[in-house]
Image (cartoon, helix red, strand yellow):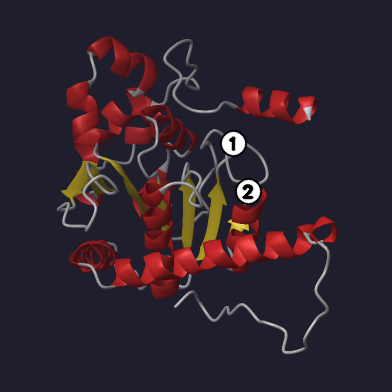
Amino acid sequence: MLNDFKLVKSKKKKKRKKFSDSSSDLSFSLESYEFRKVETAVKEFELSQFCQSILNDINDYLTFVNKNSIEEIICYGLGNFSESKTALHQLAALIVLQNKYKPEVKIYDPAFNVTEIKILEKLNFELLLENEEAKRKLSENLVSLVFFPHCPKQLINNFLWANWNNNLKNCIIISNSFSKILQDCTEKTIKASANYIKKIFPKVKEIEIENSYYFDNIFNDISIHYISQIELDCDFFLNSLETEPIYHSDIEFITKKITETQINNE
């Protein structure tokens, strides 16, 4: 179920409008159609073994940190779920997590269209208005889950830099496997685009989620990551913090500058 939200249809009969005056009706019809697609994807996800696996792993993390629930979810780079089956089922996973743990859900992707924004608002997701390049600081003392579904490594790197403090100990990151990122990149690329991933990796417990979903290209290479507090000494963050990451080439995400330029040109 998508929370308690239901699309309400009017019981009153309306006069048939001319096509030229029916743009709002067409918009509502499209929104209803896309919402039904989301509902179907949620039902499919809930019935999957993959869903049970990811919930079990998250509950193991909560036990590890002695917490009862996820209090905040932040999602970056979901994509156009009205056009992409991959993004649609990743959204379904996000909704299941929302229903399970009842957290605040914040989401950002500059690619969202008008219909998608309306659907996300009806799901009680908070749409972040600014392109933060994933540099949002975590809420202090809250247990947070940050979802980077197949996002560029630079966004994960940015997030780690912005939260290079003890708040990371209350954070679980679901993203492309850190170990695979480091294995697949050259040392030059890691230094330029994944330096903070490399720094944190020895302190991280990575749980590879078995790719048992119906569609094998939706959650492939996705892992759960969290910091093993046993491995973390008090001075780790202070002694290893460097300057804000700046990417001069191989930029795989839409930057804040690009977003601002697009807005100014509209």
Q: Nearer the viewer, residue 25 or 253?
A: 25
Can residue 141 be seen here? The reply is no
Image coordinates of residue 196 in percent, x first then y, are 35, 28
Question: Which image quadrant: the N terminus?
Answer: bottom left
| Residue 93 visible | yes
Residue identified by numbered label 2: 128
Q: What amino acid is labelled 1 in the image?
A: Glu
Query: Which residue is at the front of the view, 226 or 120?
Result: 120
Q: Are marks 2 and 1 in contact (CB under 8 Å)?
A: yes
- 140 vs 165, left or right, is right
Give, as a three-letter code, the residue at label 2: Leu
Q: Position of residue 61 (x, y in %)?
A: 25, 61
User: Of residues 225 and 51, which is closer to you in this image?
Assistant: 51
Dot 1, crowdedness within 10 Å: few (<14), some or many (≥20)? some
- Name the image quarter holding residue 67: bottom left
Residue placed under numbered mark 1 in the picture? 132
Residue 236 in the image: state x and y as whole percent.
32, 34
Please determine whether, in this image, residue 75 is positioned above or below residue 193: below
